[in-house]
Amino acid sequence: MSRRIKITAIDRIKSRTLRVALKVFMADPSLGKCQAKPLFAEICSHLQAGMDDEQVVREVVRNRAMGNPSRQLSLM
């Protein structure tokens, strides 16, 4: 008997978070010096807000360049 696993919306966002993080690091390699958890939480919160990948990349790079990372909590 096969068991089906239901993929939830948060699971989809979590899988997109890694892909977007790679794009963020390619856009600004200096972000590799940042702590990973807050950066991933910021990316995840933007994705949960409905932003597309490119908008998230621009927003994260802009926020980090200004020294103003988003302080939103994540549901991860």
Image: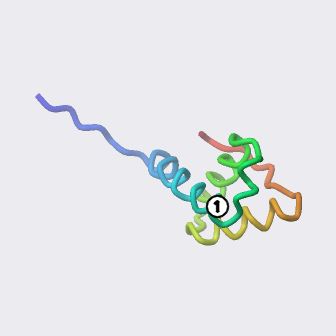
| Residue 34 x, y percent position in the rendering | 77, 47
Q: How has the structure been colored for display?
A: rainbow
* Furthest residue toward right: 67
- Residue at 15% over, 32% down: 2
Q: In this view, does 47 lie above or below 74?
A: below
Q: In this view, does 74 lie above or below 51?
A: above
Indicate the quadrant containing the C terminus: top left, top right, bottom left or bottom right: top right
* Furthest residue toward left: 1
Q: Front-most of 49 and 61?
A: 61
Count neighbours of disc 1 (C-alpha within 10 A) and say few if under 14, some if 14 to 19, many if 20 or more.
many
Q: Is residue 55 above or below residue 41?
A: below
| Residue 72 x, y percent position in the rendering | 76, 49
Q: In this view, does 1 lie to the left or right of 40?
A: left
Residue 61 occupies which quadrant of the picture?
Answer: bottom right
- Residue at 79% over, 55% down: 70
Q: What residue type is labelled 1?
A: Val
Indicate the quadrant containing the N terminus: top left, top right, bottom left or bottom right: top left
Q: In this view, does 4 lie to the left or right of 57?
A: left
- Residue at 58% over, 64% down: 50
* Furthest residue toward front: 29
- Residue at 62% over, 63% down: 26
- Judged from the image, the secondary structure of the residue bearing numbered disc 1 is helix
| Residue 22 x, y percent position in the rendering | 57, 56
Q: What residue does disc 1 label?
A: 24
